[in-house]
Image (cartoon, grey):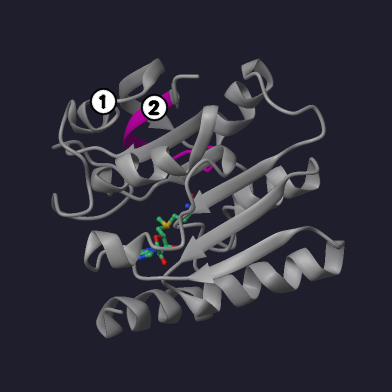
Amino acid sequence: MSEADRKKWNARYEEGAYVTRQHPSELLVDRLPGLILPESGGRAIDIACGSGRNSLYLARKGWKVDAVDISETALEQLDEKARAEGLSITGINRDLEQDLAVATDFLVADTYDLAIMFRYAHPALVEPISRALKPGGYLIVESHLVTDADVVGPRGTRHRVAPGELRTAAAGLDVLVYSEGIVLDPDGRSAAIARLVARRPE
Ligand SMILES: C[S@@+](CC[C@H](N)C(=O)[O-])C[C@H]1O[C@@H](n2cnc3c(N)ncnc32)[C@H](O)[C@@H]1O
């Protein structure tokens, strides 16, 4: 595990990172009702879940959620909320940027009805995540996009996807929605974002 990244993210969550961003992602809220999914929720995985705004949203709807992040502080914050509400959320503490086979060894083939990855740019994960979807399962991704605009999110390009990169990474899936552009977050700030909704072929 990258000790520096783990420490950096733990410190951010200890300092209250994202406490004002409790709302689930607009993309998830808008698109979930249109997908063909188990009525009372199935199994979902939230990659780079942070303190779990989207995991909580799904679990409150009856989903059984696995939630993965490098920050054990974020996972503890999420676990506390899940326990208080009696929700089914299992934290998995993992550095997703180590060797890909090791980083994704918790992914079991044909397991999930839904996989989500929000505001975390790691297109190489799309393929192993897709294999962990059940046939017909869905992947929803929202990644910061490389831009010159004055927007929120990581500085520089390392933690952003290039134009077209996310779509290319989803080549083995049926792409239902793909967009790139500037969106206005509920807190009034602008973000440069690539969005993907895709389905594993049946
Ligand atoms: C911008 S936050 C997004 C959190 C959440 N998905 C959301 O939309 O609210 C990025 C998350 O990626 C996690 N992260 C960063 N590097 C990581 C790594 N190498 N492995 C796993 N998670 C990582 C951070 O701890 C953080 O929670």
**Ligand 1 placement by image quarter:** bottom left
Reply yes or no: does residue 108 show up in magenta.
Answer: no
Q: Amino acid at mark 2?
A: Leu
For residue 3, above or below residue 186: below
Residue located 57% across and 53% down the image: 21
The residues colored magenta run: 186-197
Reply yes or no: does residue 188 show up in magenta.
Answer: yes
Q: Could you tell me what secondary structure mostly forms the magenta stretch?
A: strand
Evaluate whether residue 16 shows in this view. no
Question: Which of disc 2 and disc 1 is earlier in sequence?
Answer: 1
Residue located 28% across and 61% down the image: 101
> Residue 85 sits in which quadrant?
bottom right
> Residue 87 sits in which quadrant?
bottom right
Q: Position of residue 13 (x, y in %)?
A: 50, 74
Q: Amino acid at mark 1?
A: Arg
Front-most of residues 133 and 81: 133
For residue 117, above or below residue 159: above
Task: Label 2, secondary structure: give it.
Answer: strand
Q: Which mark is residue 167?
A: 1
- Label 1 packing within 10 angstroms: few (<14), some (14-19), many (20+): many
Tell me if label 1 and label 2 are in contact, CB under 8 Å: yes
Question: Which residue matches tag 2?
Answer: 196
Front-most of residues 176 and 173: 173
Q: In the rendered view, does 51 fall on the left or right side of 139? A: right
Badge 2 residue CB within 8 Å of ligand 1:
no
